[in-house]
Image: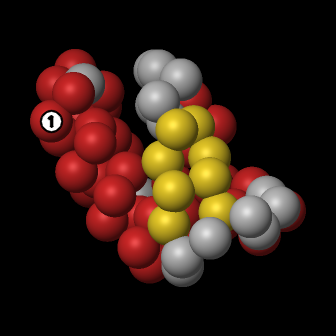
Amino acid sequence: MKTMTCKELGGPCDQPLSARSWDDMVRLMATHIAENHPVTAKRMERMHIEDPTKWSREMKPKWDAAPAA
């Protein structure tokens, strides 16, 4: 299990998010952003349309480096 904040994953807040795998974290982050940060959700949607792998390329190394709890 790893815990990272929304901000560490490119979002605007310090809410901690915990997941067992990168795929689970991606789903959790997407849900968190959609439910709590509509402006950021729109920005991330545009970014995904322009470059579908950009967010993952930037955030996955942070996930890999985060300590497991």
Percent across and percent down for residue 33 are 28, 38
Q: Nearer the viewer, residue 2 or 12?
A: 2
Percent across and percent down for residue 14 are 53, 23
Q: Quadrant of residue 45?
A: top left
Q: Quick check: 33 left or right of 3? A: left
Q: Nearer the viewer, residue 51 or 44?
A: 44
Number of numbered tags placed on the structure image: 1
Can residue 9 be seen? yes
Residue at horizontal 54 percent and vertical 79 percent from the top: 21
Q: Nearer the viewer, residue 34 or 53?
A: 34
Percent across and percent down for residue 36 are 21, 27
Amino acid at the residue labelled 1: Glu
Which residue is the extreme one toward the front? 69
Q: Quadrant of residue 34?
A: top left
Name above or below for residue 31 compared with residue 11.
below
Residue labelled with disc 1: 35
Q: How is the image coloured?
A: secondary structure
Disc 1 is placed on an element classified as helix
Residue at horizontal 74 percent and vertical 64 percent from the top: 69
- Location of the N terminus by quadrant is bottom right
Can residue 57 be seen? no
Name above or below for residue 46 compared with residue 25.
above
Q: Quadrant of residue 2?
A: bottom right
Q: Quick check: 69 left or right of 22? A: right
Residue at horizontal 24 percent and vertical 25 percent from the top: 37
Q: Quick check: 49 left or right of 6? A: left
Mark 1, other Cα within 10 Å: few <14 / some 14–19 / many ≥20: few
Percent across and percent down for residue 10 are 54, 36
Q: Quick check: 51 left or right of 41? A: right
Residue at horizontal 37 percent and vertical 51 percent from the top: 29
